[in-house]
Structure formats: structure tokens, C-alpha cells
Image: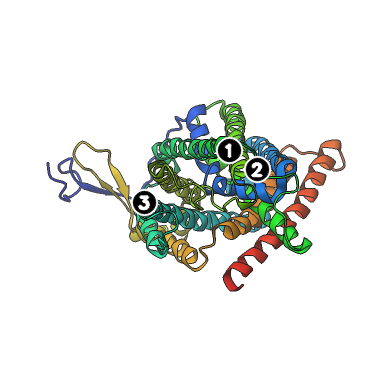
Amino acid sequence: MSDTLTPLNHQPSSIQTDTATPSLKRTGNIWTAVAHIITAVIGSGVLSLAWSMAQLGWIAGPLTMLSFASITFVSASLLCNCYMSKSDSRNRSYLDAAKNILGNKSAWLCGIFVNINFVKVGIVYTITSAISMRAIMKSNCYHKEGHKASCNYGITFYMLLFGIIQSVVSQIPDFHGTKWLSIVAAVMSFTYSIIGSALGLAKVIGNGKIKGSIGGVPTSTVAEKVWLVSQSLGDIAFAFPFTIVLLEIQDTLKPPSEMITMQKASTMAICITTFFYLCCGGFGYAAFGNSTPGNLLTGFGFYEPYWLIDFANACIVLHLIGGYQVFSQPLFAIAERLIAQKFPNNGFINRNYTLKFPHLPALRLSLLRLCFRTAYVAFTTGIAIVFPYFNQVVGVAGALTFWPIVIFFPAEMYLAHKNVEAWTTKFIVLRTYTTVCLFVLMFALVGSIEGVITAKFG
């Protein structure tokens, strides 16, 4: 049967147009939620954790990771409670919850940070995937030519290639349609995390000793050490949060026990990811000590077996294709909903085309989606090409939005939603928690920005 376009109400292989968005049935369960969370959490940040551990040392490094894991758990627990409003309507996204609970002014401010967060994740994922693609080429080159060969490859081509892939994948209509992509991405994230940990452990065994120290990498000046510590905090902050997509994930779950399911899924996912993070960071630091590379799988502390390095980097690319969508779909939904509300009678914006191929599920297309999402992918790709500095960009990205998105707004939404009175014990604890975290993240942000400036102009 041909896939030729035919008018509405003709043969099954056709493009059909409509202007109504079909209602979505929530069928998710605890395992799909865990898959979504792991896809969102275990991303490019895991690759910098060994380097971060090296800057902090054997005591401060693991404690910092556990601290950020605890903060993420608290944030998820607070936000889970904000899914159902008092009128029994659902807050289907982070911004919906901010608007309905805190009001329009707070939602406007929150929206700025939310959109910055989505964009910065897209930029970092583009950089990381390109580095991993390049690492595959370099790994094969080192295997053939020797470890001292130049094996220089540019990175721009691989960023453009990732951008082209994302332009296609971004045509998935909505977050619900990414379930299969999240499952594949979650499997990939487990795979390369295990490979990174195993390679680190194997190198420790081969070295016959555990490298590293309590104080971390020594530096020539105190100021240099301070900058590196602050940048490592930003890197770790980037590795953990998924709060920004928590309500979208919760909205995929089968009613009526969405909150209970989400709390269980969050707890499971955070425990799993923290374990893998400690393994990757710990084994990587133990293997390389003061010479720990900024990116565990692309910094070429490991050269052999080259095929395993290639496979791990391929897994990273596949995972980041899905991870990019987990963080981009909410932004797409927000922007396209606002545009549709602004121009309700515009056919270009509101008309959907259903493309049906033989033996394949129907694909819903729209001209607005095609143009807007392609332009967005081009934008994130362009920024990544200008600032292709992995560790420094990850640090800025982590520190920039962690406090408002993961700490401040979830706490404020919870206080307002639960009508917590001022100066009660719960009120004081949450406000103290947000204030202390603010100072820590400001320190991380300043150091990470200094790292980007030094990498770009120093």
C-alpha cells in the first residue's frame, strides 16, 4: 500500500487534517515513571562526577553528592503534593502549578527560570553528544595509530548531526509520546554508567591502589582551588534535578493514586541514580586521582578495550537523544499552547495532519510544530557551537537554575498549597533550607562563570 497523500475520508494510507487535539489517556505506572526520571536525571552530568570528586576529595565529594540527592528528594516530595489542586483539577506542568498556587506574577518569574532551564539542558546535551560522537572516532584512531597519535577531530559537525536528529525526533507531538524513547534512554543511561564504573574499577585493580586524597587535587593558589570547588558544585547540581518535569511525568500516571505512585517512583529513581553516581565518581577518582579527566568516557583516561569505549559513547548519544526530548517537550507544549491561544482561528497554527503509513502507528504533524521546534533545535545547536566547553558549561547550567527551580519554587508552592502558617516549625525549616541553599548555589554559579570565561578567553 502506498503512503501517497490522499484527501480526508479516503483510503487508510493518508494525511487527515483536524483542529482538535485528541484527549490523552493516562496509562503510566511506577516503572514508566522511573524510566522518565532516570532519563531526565542520569544524563551528561554523570560524566563529570569523577572530575568533581577529584576537586572535592574523598570526604567532601561523596557527602556533596548525598547532599544534592537529599535536596532533590525533598524537592520531589514537596512538588508531588502540588499536583492536585484544592478544586480537584490537575496541575499538569510545573508552570501550571506555579500559576494556580502562587499567582500570575510568580508564575511569570518562574517561567523565565523554567525556560532557561529547558534551553540550557538542550545546549549541554548537544555538547555532550557531540563530544561522545567525536570520542568514538578518536578511540578508533588511537587503537589503530597508537595512544600518542594526534587524532584531532572537530566537534561542530557532530553538533550539527545531533541537531538534525533532534529536529526529526522533536516532531513527536507531546510528552506522552516519549514513553518508548524514555525507556530506551533509561536502558542506555544504565549501560554507560555501568561501563564507566566497571572501567574505573578495573583500572583501580590494575593500578593496585586507590588514588586520590582527602583534600582533592592540589592547586598552586587558594583562589584556584576555590574556583575549582565552586565549579564542581555546579557540575554536581546539574547531575541531579528532575523537578522541572516531575508534574509532567506525574500527569502520565494512571489515576487515582498518582501522588503515591510518583513518590515511590521518585524515591526509587533517586536511590538508583545516587548509587550509580557514587560508583562513577568514586571509581573514576580512585582510578586516576589528580589526573581525573573532565569527562570520564571521552577524556581518554581509558583507551582499551576500544570497542567498549565506542559502545559506551554510542549509549550516551542514544540516551541524550531521549533526554533532550524529556526536557524539551514541556517547553514545546508551553510555547505552542500560548501561540494557539493567541491565534485560535489560524489554520497554520491549529491544524493537525495525521499521516498514516501501512503497518505503522499514525503520526500527528503540524506546520507550527515543524517550524517552531526546528527553529528551537537550531538555536540550542548554535549556542552549543559557540560555547563547546563541557565541564564549565555544565557547571554554569547546574548552578544557574538549581536554586529557583529545585529549591525555592517547590518550597513556596508547598507552603501556599498546604496553607502553612508563618513562623510555624515547618515554615521556619523550609525558609532556612532555601536560604542556606541559595548561598551555596551562588558560590557555585560565580565559580562556574569564571571557568567559562577562562576557557573562552584565557
In percent of width and height, residue 273 lies at 58, 36
**Of marks 2 and 3, which one's residue comes earlier in the chain?**
3
Which three-letter amino acid code belongs to the residue tagged 1?
Val
Point 41% across, 63% down: residue:
152
Please name whichever residue, 62 or 73, is drawn nearer the observer in this view of the structure. 62
Residue behind mark 1: 204
Q: Crowding at label 2, few (<14), some or many (≥20) Cα neighbours within 10 Å?
A: some
Amino acid bearing label 3: Asn
Nearer to us of marks 1 and 3 is 1
- Report the disc number at residue 27: none
Distance between mark 1 and mark 3 Cα atoms: 24 Å
Position of 342 relative to 44 (above/below): below
Q: Nearer the viewer, residue 454 or 436?
A: 454
Depth order, front residue of 391/55 = 55
- From the viewer's perspective, is 175 left or right of 393? left
Question: Which is more N-terminal, label 3 or label 1?
Answer: 3
Label 3, secondary structure: give it.
helix
Where, quadrant-wise, is the N terminus in this rendering?
A: top left
- Locate residue 426, reporting x and y percent: 81, 37
Locate residue 428: give its quadrant: top right
Q: Quadrant of residue 185?
A: top left
The residue tagged with tag 2: helix, strand or loop?
loop
Give residue 452's position: percent from left, percent from top.
61, 65
- From the viewer's perspective, is 232 left or right of 188? right
The answer to whether the residue labelled 1 contacts the one labelled 2, judged by CB atoms less than 8 Å apart, is: yes
**Residue in view at x 36 percent, y 61 percent:** 371
Circle number at residue 211: 2
* Separation of residues labelled 2 and 3 (CA atoms): 28 Å
Mark number, residue 140: 3
Q: Nearer the viewer, mark 2 or mark 3?
A: 2
